Image (spheres, rainbow, N blue to C red):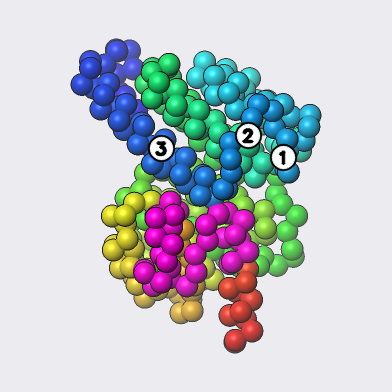
Amino acid sequence: MGYEGWDQEPDAADRETFQNRLKATIEAELIPRLMLMMRVVPPSRGLRAPGVSETFSLDPETFARRLLSDEDSACAEVERALRDGSIDFLGFCERLVVPTARLLGAMWVEDSCDFTQVTLAVWRLQRLVADHEQSGDAPAAPALAPGRILLSSMPGAQHSLGLSVLAGTFRRAGWDVRAEPCLGVDALTRLLAADAFHLVGLSASLQADLEPMRSVIIALRQSSRNPTVGVMVGGPLLLQVPDLSSRVGADLSAPDAASAVTAAQAYLAARHRQS
């Protein structure tokens, strides 16, 4: 996603190509994935929600415009709030990332900002989520992790923001998480063969993923070092195919990040009782 000739204004054909690509990224990948995980209604001005302190007042519209204008102070303000507890990771994703991404998409469609601005703004938003998910404060976790989970998207997917949100949610629930977006089937099967995971979480976005997903899951099970590995599915495709789990041969599905953790915990508890 981007344009190599940053020092040149693209011609009409190039601009339309990148406009369509970026619009598809924001509307078909980034926003649906986050909305599916969080199931949020974008808030009105001001953040007042669980996980957000009243002292944190940066609203999505202001944040979007500051990202577009390359204000590093906007990201620094969010980083400070995440560190001092004015907003937690899930509150940040629910009440700032999702509506900000939606606003950036709307600004692009309305042509109120150019393709370079919005591309870089989305990149800054993705980097902020990924950086905090990887380096944020560790959660209050139990002495032993509830389980080990490998999270990935269907091979060929190019976007990882939603997976970072999901990985962060599992980590904050104490899970041992390995998140590997955008890997091919061979790479995923090698990971499962080399290390024992309790669960694999696989995300899909498109109807075209439906048939290949069954084959991918079969390959993952066959290669797994843990012969009883469970497979959980989710992503925007779950909105279109509510019975996705049974259609592709998975063990469980979840419509959002919190539900994914709850379902995974219940699944492992049931497996433990049966053993």
The residue at which mark 2 appears reads as 43
Write down the quadrant of residue 75 in the picture: top right
Q: Is residue 41 above or below residue 237?
A: above
Amino acid at the residue labelled 1: Ala
Q: Disc 3 residue type?
A: Glu
Can see residue 131?
no
- Viewer-side label of 2, 3: 2
Residue 32 in the image: state x and y as whole percent.
46, 44
Residue 257's place in the image compared with 200, above or below, is: above
The residue singled out by tag 1 in the image is 49
Work out whether mark 2 precedes mark 3 in sequence or the reverse, and give the earlier one.
Answer: 3
Q: Residue furthest left?
A: 13
**Label 2 to label 3, Cα distance in Å?**
18 Å
In the rendered structure, which segment of residues is drawn in magenta? 235-264
Count every numbered label the image shows and give the total: 3
* Dot 1: element: loop
Contact (CB < 8 A) between labels 1 and 2?
yes
The quarter in which the N terminus is drawn is top left
Measured as percent of width and height from the top left, residue 198 is found at: 54, 71
- Kindly state the secondary structure of the residue where label 3 is placed: helix
98 in the magenta segment: no
| Kind of residue sitting beneath label 2 | Pro
Q: Look at the numbered disc 2 and give the secondary structure of its residue.
A: loop
In the picture as drawn, the residue positioned furthest to the top comes out as 8
Residue at (42% x, 35% y) in the render? 26
Is any atom of residue 95 visible in this view?
A: yes
Q: Which residue is mark 3?
A: 27
Horizontal side, residue 43 vs residue 153: left or right: right
Disc 1 crowd, CA 10 A, few/some/many (<14, 14-19, 20+):
few
- Residue beneath the point at 54% across and 50% down: 37
x and y, in percent, of residue 61 in the image: 58, 23
